[in-house]
């Protein structure tokens, strides 16, 4: 029988004004050949609400600082099972939609695990994501993006959202060590 470690998480669909979603290139340190793209976000701290966790993770992983209330309600929830770094997790996660005109990603807040497993980031159009042979999570991300953006095409941009120059459309290496 497989034993799964329970985990709660919050993730962010960070979408720019051209409907591209920010994803991080990552790998599993226990299986360096297992490479994939994923949204900003991560595990919740004890007692932390999903919105507070999503806001914290967004600040740590991208430099974008928002109050939890600015995230609104989650746009999607799922429960997944996956291995990471030798541990099997059963994760309940909620996704929040955040729109920004543009954003220059700042990964200076990465923790040790993120520095060891994230090699870069890229803003992906949904059609390119659907056409790529690269692995990404969640597996139905292009359909999720289309559904969420159709339901909330004018999702509010958080008040006072900073608008530094747009990040590169191509993959940008992460600062720091060599992942996996």
Image (cartoon, rainbow, N blue to C red):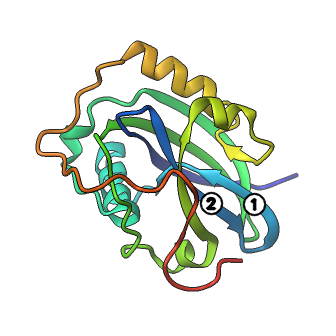
| Numbered circles on residues, count | 2
Residue depicted at 75% across the width and 47% down the height: 135
Q: Residue at x 79, y 72 (%)?
A: 32
Q: Which residue is mark 1?
A: 35
Gap between marks 2 and 1 measured at Cα = 7 Å
- Contact between marks 2 and 1 (CB within 8 A): the answer is yes
**Residue 5 percent location from the top left of the image:** 65, 57
Taking depth in this image into account, of 136 and 96 the one nearest to the observer is: 136
Dot 2 falls on a residue whose secondary structure is: strand
Instruction: Name the residue carrying label 2.
Output: 25
Identify the residue at image location x=60%, y=47%.
91
Indicate the position of residue 69 as horizontal and vertical percent values. Answer: 19, 39
Is 93 located above or below residue 88 in the figure? above
The residue at 51%/31% (across/down) is: 77
The answer to which quarter of the image holds residue 14 is: top left
Residue 147, position as x, y percentages in the image: 52, 18
């Amino acid at each position: 029988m497989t034993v799964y470690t329970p985990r709660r998480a919050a993730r962010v669909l960070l979408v720019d004004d051209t409907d591209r979603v920010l994803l991080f290139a990552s790998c599993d340190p226990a299986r360096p050949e297992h490479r994939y793209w994923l949204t900003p976000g991560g595990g919740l701290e004890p007692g932390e609400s999903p919105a507070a966790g999503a806001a914290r993770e967004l600040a740590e992983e991208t430099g974008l600082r928002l109050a939890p209330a600015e995230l609104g309600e989650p746009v999607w929830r799922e429960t997944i099972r996956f291995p990471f770094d030798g541990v099997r997790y059963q994760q309940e996660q909620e996704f929040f939609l955040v729109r920004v005109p543009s954003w220059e990603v700042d990964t200076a807040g990465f923790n040790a695990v993120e520095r060891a497993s994230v090699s870069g980031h890229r803003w992906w159009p949904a059609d390119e994501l659907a056409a790529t042979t690269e692995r990404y999570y969640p597996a139905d991300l292009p359909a999720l993006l289309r559904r969420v953006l159709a339901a909330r095409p004018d999702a509010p941009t958080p008040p006072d959202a900073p608008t530094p120059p747009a990040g590169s459309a191509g993959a940008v290496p992460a600062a720091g060590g060599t992942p996996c």
